[in-house]
Image (cartoon, rainbow, N blue to C red):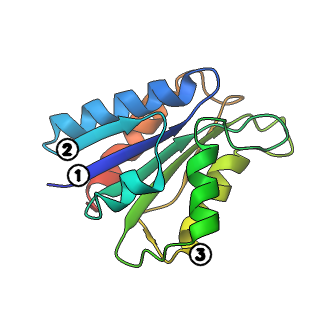
Amino acid sequence: MANVMLLVGSVYGNSSSVAEECAELLRSAGHEADVFSTASLNDLLVRPESVLLFCTSTTGQGEMPDNLYPLISELRERFPLMPERRYGVIALGDSSYETFADAGRQCDELLQELQARRIGDVLYIDACETADPEGVAIEWLRDWMTAL
């Protein structure tokens, strides 16, 4: 069974709620799952076996939420290559904005640059198309878990 670190970027709580629901499903399937509303690079480095699952919304003009920004900045500055690290991304947004789910895209691009290996496709959840982001994420997660 896998150890999953859910790294949350949230402003109004939707991403946090999605991450908590995902953590419950992961635990019920026998995986270890911890939700981090704030995390540092050190948190990632002390758990090198952990699979990372970013669950983030986008704020402002395509910016990273304040609680996830320090981790992303630290990853960009220190640039620790992670060829053995696996990850996934759940990106929440509103497609009526030009910068739809941009924070999730930024996370994915950065992890690709760090040579981490993405599991499956990025899940983009559009607030214009669904009122149940948790349900959409759970359906995606069921498939995602098969690759763990």
The residue drawn where x is 46% and y is 30% is 18
Residue for badge 1: 3
Please give left or right for residue 95 compared with residue 28 in the image: right
- Mark 3 and mark 1 residues within 8 Å of each other at the beta carbon: no
Dot 2 amino acid type: Glu
Closer to us: 6 or 37:
37
Q: CA distance from mark 2 to mark 3?
A: 27 Å
Residue for badge 3: 113
In this rendering, the answer to whether 9 lies above or below 77 is above
From the top left corner, tell me how far across and down residue 83 is, in percent.
41, 79
Dot 1 amino acid type: Asn
Q: Secondary structure at mark 1?
A: strand
Tag 3 or tag 2, which sits nearer the N-term?
2
Q: Secondary structure at mark 2?
A: strand
- Mark 2 and mark 1 residues within 8 Å of each other at the beta carbon: yes
From the top left corner, tell me how far across and down residue 12 is, in percent.
63, 20
The residue drawn where x is 55% and y is 50% is 71
